[in-house]
Amino acid sequence: MLNLYPDIKPYARHKLAVDLPHELYIEESGNPDGIPVLFVHGGPGGGCEDYHRRFFDAERFRIILMDQRGAGRSTPLAELEGNSTDKLVQDMETIRTFLGIERWLLFGGSWGSTLCLIYAQTHAERVLGLVLRGIFLCRPKDISWFYQDGASRVFPDYWLEFEAQIPESERGDMVSAYYRRLTSDNELEQIQAAKAWSVWEGRCATLHPNPRVVEHFGHPHVAIALARIECHYFMNSAFLEDNQIVRDAHKLKDIPGVIVHGRYDMVCPLDNALALSKAWPEADLRIIRDAGHSASEPAIVDALIRGVDEVMAKTVERAG
């Protein structure tokens, strides 16, 4: 089984101003003359972690990490103004131009898969290939599954703590109820709601309990951005039209792709990946038997690293 590549440090860091008040954090590591690859983090609002650089061979790839609007080291933290899917796609194009990149490989999981797909459907000519994990189509039923009725029946003990933040009279629409608290003027109410929202996700993300993942999700800096931005997007149907990603999947037919999805993914159930695979049959679907949602699970890591090699081999084959 393949493991993450050795730890590396960035050779360049950038702060890029986009629409006010947003300033994006971007970093580059690996080989400055290598194949450009953009790591697209989840959430929305999740931010990048140091280990995200390690999915790629540092001798072969120019590894680019970006924190999306309001997330990670981008500023202002947890900012909702001007934060929408079309703006994030626009930011990716701005970064590509800023870094002088003609075409790049896109690598993303969960919400990162969503954003990669929307970008590729909008700018197919700029995409060398797609390596995607934990597909999230952002359909109403996908949001309802995790925040209203679905995962709550798989993890009823964790759900009790998630719903405890909300009075019983408001529990018929948990996303709206959380949104009111996450946008409240009461900072204590905000952070309490954010931590409950984020820890719920962290607890459900792995097949086996992983305290490190839960601890990361529960960190106040991570929790406030993840919860506020996710809830903002879900209140607005992720700023997408109904079933938009599947509807427009034909635009991906000339792009090499690998889809990696855990059999026991409780955050984004497997039917997301199956619906995408049916609409985009040119991509290779890998269902990982002993995994849930998290990118850090060993079998997911193995499949993603193999996926990068497979997609790049197809890209070279097509170019030849």
Image: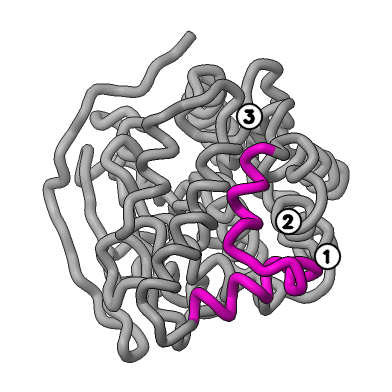
User: x, y (%) of residue 68?
Assistant: 40, 66
Quarter of the image where the C terminus is located: top right
Label 3: which secondary element: loop
Residue 235 quadrant: bottom right
How far apart, in angstroms, are the residues tagged by discs 2 and 3? 17 Å
Where is 237 relative to 49, above or below? below
Asked if the residue at tag 1 contacts the one at tag 2, i.e. Cβ–Cβ closer than 8 Å, the answer is yes
Residue stretch rendered in magenta on the structure? 157-183
Where is 37 relative to 315, above or below? below
User: x, y (%) of residue 10?
Assistant: 16, 45
Q: Amino acid at mark 1?
A: Asn
Where is 309 relative to 148, above or below? above
- Can residue 281 be seen at all in this image of the molecule? no
Left or right for 66, reference 91: left
Residue to which mark 1 is pinned:
243
Name the N-terminal-most of marks 2 and 1.
2
Residue to which mark 2 is pinned:
137
Residue drawn at point x = 50 percent, y = 34 percent: 295
Residue drawn at point x = 67 percent, y = 64 percent: 121
Residue 246 quadrant: bottom right
How far apart, in angstroms, are the residues tagged by discs 2 and 1? 7 Å
Residue to which mark 3 is pinned:
292
Label 1: which secondary element: loop
How far apart, in angstroms, are the residues tagged by discs 1 and 3? 24 Å
Label 2: which secondary element: loop
Q: For the residues carrying marks 2 and 3, which lies nearer the camera in this image?
A: 3
Left or right for 201, reference 29: right
Q: Nearer the viewer, residue 315 or 85?
A: 85
Q: Nearer the viewer, residue 76 or 130?
A: 76
Most extreme residue toward the top is 1
